[in-house]
Amino acid sequence: MLRSECLLTDAEDTRPYDCDGLTLYRQLPMVVALPETTAQVAAVLKLCHELRIPVVPRGAGTGLSGGALPHATGVLLSLAKLNRIIAIDARARIATVEPGVRNLAISEAAAQHRLYYAPDPSSQIACTIGGNVAENAGGVHCLKYGLTLHNVLRIRGLTMEGEAVEFGSHALDAPGLDLLPLVVGSEGMLAVVTEVTVKLVPTPQLARCVMASFDRVEDAGNAVATLVAAGIIPAGLEMLDQAASRLVEPHARAGYDLDAAAVLLCESDGTPAEVEEEIFRISEILRSARATRIQVSSSEAERLRFWAGRKNAFPAAGRAAPAYYCMDGTIPRKHLGGMLKAIQAMEQKYGLRCPNVFHAGDGNLHPLILFDDGDPDSVARAVAFGVEILEESVRLGGTITGEHGVGVEKIDQMCSQFGGPTLEAFFGVKRAFDPSGLLNPGKVVPTLHRCAELGGMAVHAGTLKFADLPRF
Amino acid sequence: MAASLESLLDLVRAAAAARTPLRIRGGGTKDFYGNTPSGEILDTRGLQGIVAYEPSELFVTANAGTSLRELEAVLTERGQMLPFEPPHFGDSATVGGCVAAGLAGPRRASFGATHGGVRDFVLGARLLDGRGQLLSFGGTVIKNVAGYDVARVLAGSLGVLGVIVEVSLKVLPRPLAETTLRFELDQAAALVRLNEWGGRPLPISASAWCGGELFLRLSGAPAAVAAARDILGGTEIVGDGPWTEIREQRHVFFSGDPPLWRISVPSTADVVGFGNQQMIEWGGALRWLRSAHPAAEIRAKAQTLGGHATLFRGGDRSQGVFTPLSPALKAIHRRLKAEFDPAGIFNPGRMYAEP
């Protein structure tokens, strides 16, 4: 079924697969299978189904919520060797690729046609499109260009029984219920992805970035809401608080205003005339929203320098403390300033520092709780800190996860976001796709029994693997 | 009689117990769409009103029975819109019906960014399932990956999973500038041009070819629209162009008797054939066909071209209007239906003869 080197059973060989990007949870799988063809994937699934063996699919393992955590008595199914770009159709503006192809590799292959794949999670040099589909990955350009879901046309996959199934099509719709939005973001629990067709979009002629400083975080938060209300959908809209700016500046030398309470990065892309017009409007609005300093990138090098700080926030956090815990809640934009204030109060309460980087345009928060993973008390405080942020996100009308997924990490917080009947319906969806329940079991959806025992509360922490990889 | 949410819950529970089929209906403007409805009418128009609308948060939440026209008027007042430009097919169209039908209009295939179909703009929904329970999926924020994204599946579900009671939609600013260009081209040449333009960063927000004329709508920043107009050429049209007529199927192409087929294909697909009564939208990805040719031939051709064909209006509907599913998909559909509607009471046969 598989070549012998594609089947790993010794602990020393399976060790690298014992966790994904969330390293707090580790589990050796019974066996790691590395199929090289779709037919081999199907054969593995058929056999596992017959023998009632759980299967956990995995891409590059950069996920941040433990979605690819192995099962002790299961098969860890790596799709990494299915890494061919099957076709780039420049005329139709689509690329058809195997799941193990890296996100950035698609844009690199399409560049000669002046096209690219828009969703750009910051781990894009390493993460695979199969993993992006599993998590419905985002990035810094979602506000304008959409999430993975909005950029995928067709998914070919296999059911747990090993049967081929196709969701979506190369047309803009397909007959029957539109199941693509269930499969995208399903965290490997509904089907195993074997082929993905993504949309490619024309590369903008020009992109420029406005960097604005604010004396108060509330002003920065209000500026975001004002921009959007004025009808501007920037290509990127990111915020760093003062702690985050000071954390990254020594390494990235991005030129951030270290006296500012918050720095906003706002990008415009399009034709030169369009960008000039939009940059003018953005600057006017930011100025009236009490920006204290505004700089506009005058060259591509300068634009990339503005972004360098933001993109290196995570590696910088890794250097600043023994460990850090990244949260991923999303809240309505209007609460951004208030949320920052609330997090500042929590820093006092838990005695831990927490620099903040936000996908401000999407209301997606990435607070970085700095703690000492060698000190159980520090770990416990970090965990409680994280839970309070997520619960506050839900309370403000948001969600516990904007783009990193639930996995094993946030399964308990699902109890605070969803009611019993809705959680039951999620199990119904799972059964409809995977009646045997063998595909990535035990993730994402908590049982009602578990929720009852927790009383709606949650406790978990994690630290990051690949700490030097740019993220988010 | 339109009923409140409480009475709908009672009605559904009673129907589930007695296994009485229910036909979910808003304003009835899309009664023609899908297979012939049957069952006792469950009227959603008692579920009225906009629940929340925050322009700076780019979302609107409305009860299912809210008039689509009124909702769009409220958005227009604040300079925003439903980006999928849905057809109404009548004054009484409701928000719930719009989502359940899942039909998008000319802006569906805007080239470049921020476009999509109905499901791409659904953020959340409340659903009354076949057990008489209220389920709540998604939310009002753009980025949300907690749990399976069931809310988006409701777009185009034709009510077979349950009654949509409330829906949250992403809205977008109306473009600052808009203009329409006209070209004279035959169908094959229009398809070549549309696909070529699609690969360039041009602000095209709608396209329609019919009877030797190609119309293009440009939307966006004034500078971008002006620059694109200069690049593309053609003749600029005074007024709003044919977009509303096409969206609402009041254009002359849609009058007359021959059955109307909706053929969804990759934008680069060849000319469909079956005579010259055709209209092309969505940059080539949507082909409307008036033809009395046998359904099997039209479906086979659509499939060869990489798409599918729906008998949209008229014709012999006894064999089902939608393209049949593969066995693997059919099995998932059947099980999903059984999970949400175990007694099989909602819109039986509206999508496919068997659940």
Image (cartoon, coloured by chain):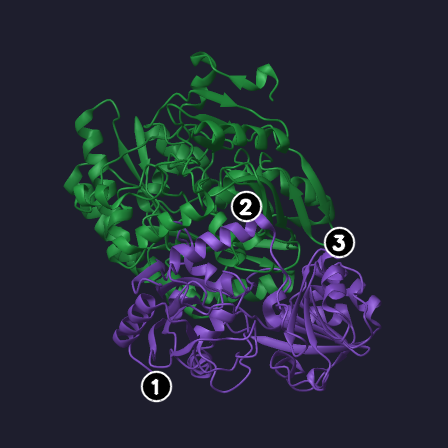
Q: Nearer the viewer, residue B321 or A129?
A: B321
User: Disc 3 designates what residue?
Assistant: A91
Q: Nearer the viewer, mark 2 or mark 1?
A: 1
Say what secondary structure mark 2 lies in: helix
Q: Which residue is mark 1?
A: B1
Q: Position of residue B35 (x, y in %)?
A: 56, 72
Q: Amino acid at mark 2?
A: Glu
- The number of callouts visible is 3
Residues at marks 2 and 1, CA–CA distance in whole angstroms: 64 Å
**Upstream in the sequence, badge 2 or badge 3?**
3
Labels 1 and 3 in the same subunit: no
Three-letter amino acid code of the residue under disc 3: Arg
Which label sits in the foreground, 1 or 3? 1
Chain of the residue under the numbered disc 1 shown in the image: B
Q: Residue furthest left?
A: A349
> Chain for mark 2?
A
To which chain does the residue with label 3 belong?
Answer: A
Q: Which quadrant of the view contains residue B343?
A: bottom left
Q: A202 left or right of B140?
A: right
Q: CA distance from mark 2 to mark 3?
A: 33 Å
Give the residue number, with chain letter if any, for mark 2: A302
Disc 1/disc 3 C-alpha distance (Å): 52 Å
Q: In the rendered image of this protein, which colour is used for chain A? A: green
Mark number for residue A183? Answer: none
Which corner quadrant holds the N terminus of chain B? bottom left
Compared across the picture, whether B6 is left or right of A5 comes to: left
Assess disc 3: are there few (<14), some (14-19) or many (≥20) residues with their C-alpha within 10 Å of its C-alpha.
Answer: some
| Rendering coords of residue B273 (x, y %) | 81, 68
